[in-house]
Each structure stands twice: as C-alpha cells, then as structure tokens.
C-alpha cells in the first residue's frame, strides 16, 4: 500500500467518524414508564409521540415493566399520548 492510498483511507475513516458524531448531535431519545395513579406499571399501553411542528407520529407499546423508548428523534416539540384498555 502506498502513502497516497493510506491517506485516502485515513480521510474516509475520519469523515465517517465526523458524520456519526454530527448525526448524534442532531437527534435525541425519549424514554419513560407508564404507571397508574397508585404507581403500578401498565404493560401493553400504547404510547404515541407526535411532533407538533410536522405532525409526524411514532407509536410504541410499553413493555412488561411499563417502560417505553423512542430513539432517533429530531429536535422539536412533541406531544405524548398514552392509552390502555380499561383506563380512561
């Protein structure tokens, strides 16, 4: 391998690392737990996250421990709605 090829390879690797870092700075995540008023977790609840600027919706279902997570979220304002069978 000559020096030119090595330099091109190094530049590509550095660019890939920079892009990964830049992407991480422009996205976020949201996690939480669904609980009833007494603090009991609610598994199987439907959680809907709505970007109030774009109207884009993402849906998740709470796990057996009531937890949920949304990843790769664009910066912005969001509205969170939760529903579950048997709850008003």
Image (cartoon, rainbow, N blue to C red):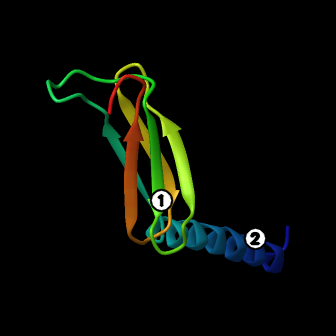
As drawn, the label of residue 65 is none
For residue 27, side relative to residue 56 (left or right):
left
* Furthest-left residue in this view: 38
Mark 2 or 1, nearer chain start: 2
Look at 14% across and 24% down and name the residue there: 38
Measured from the top left, where is residue 76 in percent x and y? 42, 72
Measured from the top left, where is residue 6 in percent x and y? 76, 72
**The image quarter in which residue 52 lies:** bottom left
Indicate the secondary structure of the residue bearing disc 2: helix
**The image quarter in which residue 41 lies:** top left
Q: Nearer the viewer, residue 78 or 73?
A: 78
Give the distance between the C-alpha atoms of the residues marked 2 and 1, in whole angstroms: 41 Å
Measured from the top left, where is residue 35 in percent x and y? 25, 30
Indicate the secondary structure of the residue bearing disc 1: strand
Q: Nearer the viewer, residue 81 or 61?
A: 81
Total count of labels: 2
For residue 4, side relative to residue 55 (left or right):
right
As drawn, the label of residue 9 is 2
Q: Nearer the viewer, residue 83 or 42?
A: 83
Quadrant placement of the N terminus:
bottom right
Is residue 57 depicted above or below 44 in this figure? below
Quadrant placement of the C terminus:
top left
Is residue 33 depicted above or below 79 in this figure? above
Is residue 68 depicted above or below 21 in this figure? above
Please name the residue that numbered disc 1 is placed on. Answer: 50
């Amino acid at each position: 391998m000559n020096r030119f090829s090595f330099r091109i390879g190094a530049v590509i690797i550095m660019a890939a690392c920079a892009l990964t870092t830049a992407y991480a700075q422009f996205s976020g995540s949201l996690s939480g737990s669904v609980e009833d008023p007494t603090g009991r977790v609610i598994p199987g609840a439907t959680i809907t996250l709505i970007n109030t600027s774009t109207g884009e919706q993402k849906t998740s279902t709470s796990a057996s421990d009531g937890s949920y997570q949304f990843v790769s979220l664009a910066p912005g304002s969001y509205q969170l709605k939760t529903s579950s069978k048997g709850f008003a």
